[in-house]
Each structure stands twice: as structure tokens, then as C-alpha cells.
Image: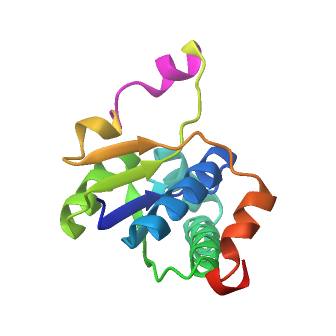
């Protein structure tokens, strides 16, 4: 059904929920997995760099660690993910990478925002659904540590 699945991962609780759900789906489909983390480009980050030299490098390093943790989760399931870290607005970056790899499914988490948060954030990033040309799964199914651990067991040990 799905052969190339892109998992967008930001390290949040909602991102981990989506990562687990997408990873289990990829395992069951025998799909190739791509893991993408997007470091949001912001004027605040650039200003921090002016005040605290190395702030950008610290953020990049933090996101590389985040990406490595996501890769480790996927490898536990026997998947061999292709991982990438990019800087920019998340929705367009997810869309560009999905197109580049020929994804047939993008999986991401959802973090509810208050009315004020939506108002302040505006439409600068837009919605991911406007940027991808394939199926989109918003992972919301919480998979317990026990259920996930059971999936880590080789089939011959079950």
C-alpha cells in the first residue's frame, strides 16, 4: 500500500506519538522510511546569534540529537531510515522533501493551539496539506511503551 513514508519529527510528545504510529505502519507495509526534522527559521534565532554567538550552532546540535533519537527508535523496529535535518518553515520544507523522495504518505503529529496562538503565528507556514501531494496521516493514536516494546520482538520469539 505505502512504499515510501515520510515521518516529520519535532521531538514533541505529539511528534513521538506520530513517530511510533508511522513507524509501525511502515514496518507492516515494508515501506522505506524517511525521517525529517525541521529547525524553524526565525528572526528571534538570528537575533540570539547576534547576542550569543553560537546560538544557531547550539540549536542545530540540539536538532541533530533529536533526529538521532528518532533514528534510534526506527532502527529498534528493524527499519533503516534516511534522516535529514533542514532549516526553514516546517510546512513547505515537509512538502519539498516529500516531493523530492516521492513519498506516498507523510505522517506527522498535531499540537493543538489556542485561538491566540493561531492568531499570533499567522499563516506564514501554512498547512502541511497545502504543501504535500500525497496522503497525509496525522498520528494521534497513543501507543503504550508495552505495545511498542512488543513490536520490537523478532517474529520468531513471539
Residue 125 against residue 16 in the figure, above or below: above
Verify whether residue 53 appears in magenta.
Answer: no
> Residue reaching furthest top?
115
- x and y percentages locating residue 39 in the rendered image: 49, 58
The N terminus lies in which quarter of the figure?
Answer: bottom left
Nearer-the-camera pick, 43 or 143 = 143
Residue 145 against residue 116 in the figure, above or below: below
Q: How is the image coloured?
A: rainbow
Residue found at x 66% / y 86%: 156
Residue 124 against residue 82 in the figure, above or below: above
Residue found at x 24% / y 43%: 131
> Residue reaching furthest right?
146
- x and y percentages locating residue 3 in the rendered image: 29, 67
Residue found at x 46% / y 46%: 43
**The quadrant where residue 38 appears:** bottom left
- x and y percentages locating residue 9 in the rendered image: 53, 58
**Apparent side of residue 105 relative to residue 153 in the rendered image (left or right):** left
- x and y percentages locating residue 127 in the rendered image: 34, 34
**Apparent side of residue 105 relative to residue 65 in the rendered image (left or right):** left
Is residue 20 visible in the rendered structure shown here?
yes
Residue extent of the magenta highlight: 116-126
Amino acid at each position: 500500500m505505502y512504499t515510501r513514508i515520510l515521518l516529520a519529527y519535532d521531538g514533541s510528545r505529539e511528534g513521538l506519538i506520530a513517530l511510533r504510529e508511522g513507524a509501525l505502519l511502515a514496518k507492516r507495509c515494508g515501506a522505506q522510511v524517511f525521517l525529517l526534522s525541521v529547525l524553524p527559521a526565525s528572526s528571534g534565532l538570528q537575533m540570539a546569534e547576534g547576542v550569543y554567538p553560537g546560538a544557531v550552532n547550539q540549536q542545530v546540535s540540539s536538532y541533530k540529537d533529536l533526529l538521532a533519537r528518532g533514528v534510534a527508535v526506527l532502527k529498534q523496529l528493524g527499519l533503516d531510515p534516511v534522516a535529514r535535518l533542514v532549516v526553514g518553515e516546517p510546512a513547505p520544507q515537509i512538502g519539498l522533501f516529500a516531493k523530492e523522495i516521492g513519498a506516498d504518505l507523510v505522517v506527522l503529529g498535531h499540537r493543538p493551539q489556542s485561538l491566540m496562538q493561531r492568531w499570533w503565528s499567522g499563516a506564514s507556514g501554512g498547512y502541511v496539506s497545502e504543501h504535500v501531494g500525497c496522503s497525509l496521516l496525522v498520528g494521534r493514536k497513543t501507543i503504550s511503551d508495552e505495545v511498542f516494546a512488543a513490536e520490537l520482538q523478532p517474529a520468531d520469539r513471539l
